[in-house]
Image (spheres, rainbow, N blue to C red):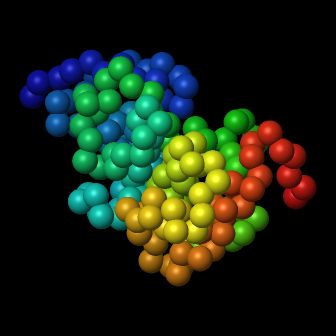
Amino acid sequence: MSTHEVNVAVNGTPTATTVEARTLLVQLLRGPLGLTGTHVGCDTTNCGACTVLIDGEPVKSCTVLAVQADGSEVTTVEGLADGEQLAPVQEGFRQCHGLQCGFCTPGVLTTAAALLEQTPDPDEAQIRDYLDGCMCRCTGYQMIVDSVRWAAEHPADEEVAS
């Protein structure tokens, strides 16, 4: 088996590790790096539970080789919050009950964070379109959409009452 050194910044922390050439990014994140917030749902890019951000773009980490992320900034669901301060999209899910079982939530959160970075004030159709690759089996998506809208209406610099 051939191995490769991979240098990535994960949630802002520079990381260097050696992986087998066939190691998937999700395996690196969940295994040696211990970031289990990124879920493995289908291994076929259908569900989106494994979505992370690579250089700000949402990607399904079950189909990206770890070596493909070499030199990149990877953000997982664990990297969205600023310490104890939830990111607006995370607070939106709390405020609007955007999750049920929570299995899809990490992928939805990272995808929604990318949407809000690109489109700070998306309408319902834009949210639904952008989240199209994220499958939730528990909800009808309305509370997810409401959560993302809440986040758009409450940017990170705004204080939120609990």
- Is 77 rendered above or below residue 102? above
Q: In the image, residue 109 lies at what x, y percent?
A: 55, 54
Quadrant in which the C terminus appears: bottom right
- Is 58 rendered above or below residue 83? below
Quadrant in which the N terminus appears: top left
Q: Nearer the viewer, residue 70 or 131?
A: 131
Q: Does the image show residue 86?
A: no
Side (left or right) of 5 relative to 124: left
Q: In the image, residue 94 lies at what x, y percent?
A: 72, 62
Q: Does the image show residue 162?
A: yes
The residue sitting at 24% across, 37% down in the picture is 65
The residue sitting at 69% across, 54% down in the picture is 152
Q: In the image, residue 22 lies at what x, y percent?
A: 17, 36
The image quadrant of residue 7 is: top left
Q: In the image, residue 5 lies at what x, y percent?
A: 27, 18
Side (left or right) of 24 relative to 87: left
Q: Residue furthest left?
A: 1
Side (left or right) of 21 relative to 128: left
The residue sitting at 90% across, 55% down in the picture is 161
The residue sitting at 52% across, 68% down in the picture is 125
Side (left or right) of 138 relative to 122: left
Q: How many marks?
A: 0
The image quadrant of residue 69 is: top left
Q: Nearer the viewer, residue 128 or 4?
A: 128
